[in-house]
Amino acid sequence: MKFTPEKYKIEDKPMHPFLDAEEIQDYLDNTISTPEKVRTIIQKSLNKNRLNLEDVATLVNTEDPALIEEIKEAARTLKRNVYGNRIVLFAPLYVGNLCMNNCEYCGFRASNTNAKRRTLTKQELIENVEALEENGHKRLILVYGEHKKYSPEFIAETVRTVYNVKKGPGEIRRVNINAAPLDIEGFRTVMESGIGTYQVFQETYHKDTYATVHLSGKKADFDNRLVSLDRAQEAGLDDVGIGALFGLYNWKFDVLGLVRHTNHLEACYNIGPHTISFPRLQNALEYKVRDEYKVSDEDFVRLVAILRLAVPYTGMILTAREPDHIRQQVLEFGCSQIDAGTKIAIGAYAEQYKKGQELDKEQFFINDERSLKDVIEDLVNQEYLPSFCTACYRLGRTGEHFMEFSVPGFIKRFCTPNAILTMAEYLEDYASEDTARKGWSLINRELDKFEDESYKKRVLERIEKIKAGERDQYF
Ligand code: SAM
Ligand code: SF4
């Protein structure tokens, strides 16, 4: 993969704020989209080259519907050629909603006296993890407000607790984190508990807008958050996730912001973000999304396709904030991870919870409330292969998304077989008869596609072991 960085006004240096709003705006104002340019850029991406800011500005400035369709089609092609048809499933688990910040858009903000505050006790955490394991989950992201109670030691302790919960055949094999940014020492402490990815979303890369929605608390410091994942890298935690909360400011600006951030991490640490998230702003308790920067469904789908082309090696995460029909479209562009069976009210996995009665416990409102079982069935019906794979992380194959993208045959050798094996486990342990029937037939169709007979035999041997009761088989 080739990436020739542009020269930016602010030179990239580790731990130094790098974002120049005027420069991003200049790109947006002075880049003209023509069919020739768009097609050249699309080709550049399909040839596995990273796009620079000017390229991305050209794509976001494309308004001709036919050309936008070409951009989306290119993202679909990239998905087909590179990522295969597996979709990794995970669940978010909210550990606590105490918060000292005042992010205007979030139900957990300190000034929201109507939010019921709660932190799961160790026992409650265990019960919630058990409930998730009973459904078949293997990968979690733990989410926390920003509060002195949620120290690095506290976070690390919750991670260790989660890994120790084993319910029946269930276990959690990968824990990711979405929490406040830490100092270097703090990142090290959390890393040592064995986490996968640490996510910190910048929310918006437009500093002036950022200041108007982050009214007080540590998070109000834009630059401190901007370089927080540099601190993670300095601590040796190189598996980081970035994101923007679309709807706070002009989406085109924030798409460029995400790419600029990616370029900064690559320039300073030679490793880009493992994942990019693009949550779209939702109504929350005592917060209603304003119309000014609201991102329409059309623009949202378009921005995901552009991000796919801009940073082709990165995992893209889509969440239950989006309704099913948007999920369907965006999956075609190579979103490699989605959450499933999501409940974001604190403690809700273990407790009887009826939407409408206890909304005050939620951070924001979600749009896809299907159970894990339903999501799996829907994926199978659409020929996607659900995956709970955690192999790369556990075998120390770091930068797995980069490898999927750049190592020929990586998907065939590792991702598809591991998706098949984790799906086989799921079908054996958790699926209804009907899902199991459909799931096994999908697995068989996948096996038929194997070109290497000896490799197929190795996968089949492992499937037999799973059928005989062995678990956690992977390549
Ligand atoms: N407290 C930590 C922080 O702010 O980084 C981590 C947890 S916070 C609950 C996780 C993410 O939720 C935020 O980074 C933000 O992007 C997202 N979020 C907050 N309010 C939202 C809303 N109303 N709609 C959609 N996403 C929201
Ligand atoms: Fe707190 Fe995070 Fe919500 Fe902001 S987004 S109020 S920091 S939980």
Image (cartoon, helix red, strand yellow):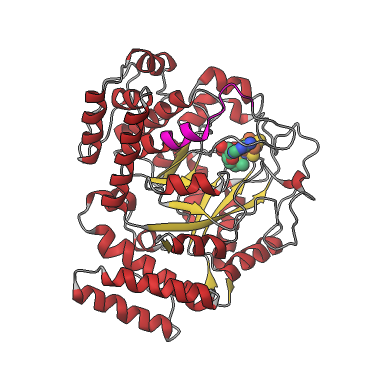
Residue 342 rendering spot, x and y as whole percentages: 60, 54
Q: Is residue 469 left or right of residue 141?
A: left
The reply, left or right, for residue 147 in relation to residue 432 is: right
- Do we see residue 475 in this rendering? no
- The image shows residue 234 at horizontal and vertical percentages of 40, 39
- Looking at the rendered image, the quarter that the N terminus falls into is top left
Q: In the image, is residue 296 part of the stretch drawn in magenta? A: yes
Which quadrant of the picture is home to ligand 1?
Answer: top right
- Residue furthest to the bottom in view is 468
State how many labels appear: 0
Q: Can residue 172 be seen in the rendering of this structure?
A: yes
Give the image location of residue 375, x and y in percent: 53, 60
Q: Residue at x 42, y 69 (%)?
A: 422
Q: Is residue 374 above or below residue 155?
A: below
Highlighted magenta segment, given as a residue range: 290-303
Q: Give the quarter of the figure containing the C terminus.
A: bottom left
Q: Nearer the viewer, residue 91 or 12?
A: 91
Vertical placement of residue 228 versus 11, above or below: below
Q: Quadrant of residue 158?
A: bottom right
